[in-house]
Amino acid sequence: MAFIAPLKGVHFNPQKVGKLDEVVTPPYDVISAHGVDSYLARNPYNMIRLDIVKSHGPGDETNARYQEAADLFKQWLEEKVLVRDPEPGIYLYHTEYSHPSGKRLTRKGFVALVGLADFAEGVVKPHEQTFDTVIADRLRLTATCKAQFSQIFSLYSDPHNAVLTLLELQERDSLGSVTDGDGCVHSLWRVTNSETIKEVQRQFLNKSLYIADGHHRYTTALAYRKMVSEAKGELAANDPANHIIMYLCPMEDPGLSVLPTHRLLRWPGMMGAGELLTCLDRYFLCEEIVGGSRETLMGEVLARMSELERLSLDKSSSTFGVYHPSEDRCFLLSLKQEGRDALAGRPEPLRDLDVVVLSDIIMDKALGLDHHRCEQEKLVSYYSDPDEALDVAVKECLLSEHFTPLLFLMNPTRVGQVRDVADHDLIMPHKSTYFYPKIMTGLLFNQLVDGEEIERIG
């Protein structure tokens, strides 16, 4: 059972900081070094001053950068740059955005505290692997600042949309809206009605939660709880350290989107399109897409992939696009039975994942590049925007004589596949899902106050 609780959310004071658009950021893990500078230049109160405190290198063990963030957090609270709501609430969070298909959608969810549960308990379920170095950095930031600056993005099942309908019927206070760099509009409202909150809590007592984005942040919260319990002894269920701030979205929500993450492979050495097809022919039907510019070829193969995916209904179509920029040739790949047979050793929920077909069949068996080599030699880059990926691939084929760029185009992982993998206690390959849009950091976050009691039922 999942334990949901209201929180006294912390948010920026527009009277002090000006436009909220200038102080929020995407999650820390998608911001480049160049991006840090651009966010800092927007507004002296930009959230990046609190949330981005990454280590400068393996030998950098100083706590100064974490303490600087903690001191700034305390100062902003004292100066009312940041305000903490006086009473706990649940926060409706809507995101209006343009899907790459051109449709204008609204994703609906809410923000609350969630009681921490070890993954083995089956209450909160992951689908991706985490890395200890990232967790160590986030743990030091959490412990020093006593705050959770970023929300976990999680899914739950609610076919009749009972929870959001209940929250949307209540009186609520608007906390404003922000527009991110992609033109997505993020809006937040606070619901404080105690009976409504208790009913939402009761609704979740028989639900599991599925992490969509934020595996490292969740694992960090587990590590922080362990750190606090080792210092204080066994924690009460309603101790702040026993909770994490989450954005929760029903997996049936019509505004929920998962975008594909395309792969740009840098094949070591020179490989022509004919040689590539020879490698792939054993496992795939390969159909060349012809006519028009490179952009037209890309558009056509992506449209064909999307249509085949739509027609395949409950299962993945296992179709891919591959573009060879050096020869300006594009192909549609459809998995043969021999390719499916080669996945027989994988658990069934993984056999249906395109990202597994790509890593096991295309990369490993067809091209002879195992996951370890791809990671060690940084042979693969990931792009959610196919136009950006195409631009990089074309530029690299003109500049390099030591490798051949090959752009592999993907269909998105389905939400149901995320659920099935998590329910079977399995893990997807790296960069399997890209839930869009990202949750904004700085719109709302959670202060961990020693001695407070979180309002839980159950």
Image (cartoon, rainbow, N blue to C red):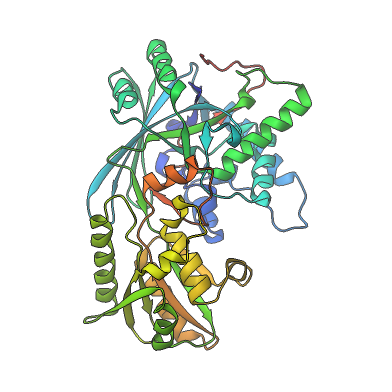
Q: Residue 361 or 355: which is nearer the viewer?
A: 361
Q: Can see residue 71?
A: no
- Res 66 quadrant in image: top right
Residue occupying image coordinates x 52% and y 69%? 380
Place of residue 67 in the rendered image (x, y in percent of width and height, measured from the top left): 71, 40
Q: Residue 84 or 333: which is nearer the viewer?
A: 333
Place of residue 416 in the rendered image (x, y in percent of width and height, measured from the top left): 37, 44
Residue occupying image coordinates x 63% and y 20%? 239
Place of residue 442 in the rendered image (x, y in percent of width and height, measured from the top left): 49, 38
Q: Can see residue 134?
A: yes
Residue occupying image coordinates x 39% and y 88%? 274
Number of numbered discs present?
0
- Where 20 falls versus 319 (above or below)? above
Q: Residue 403 or 363: which is nearer the viewer?
A: 363
Instruction: Please state if 104 lies on the left or on the right of 409 as rendered.
Output: left
Place of residue 427 in the rendered image (x, y in percent of width and height, measured from the top left): 53, 50
Instruction: Please state if 68 lies on the left or on the right of 327 as rendered.
Output: right
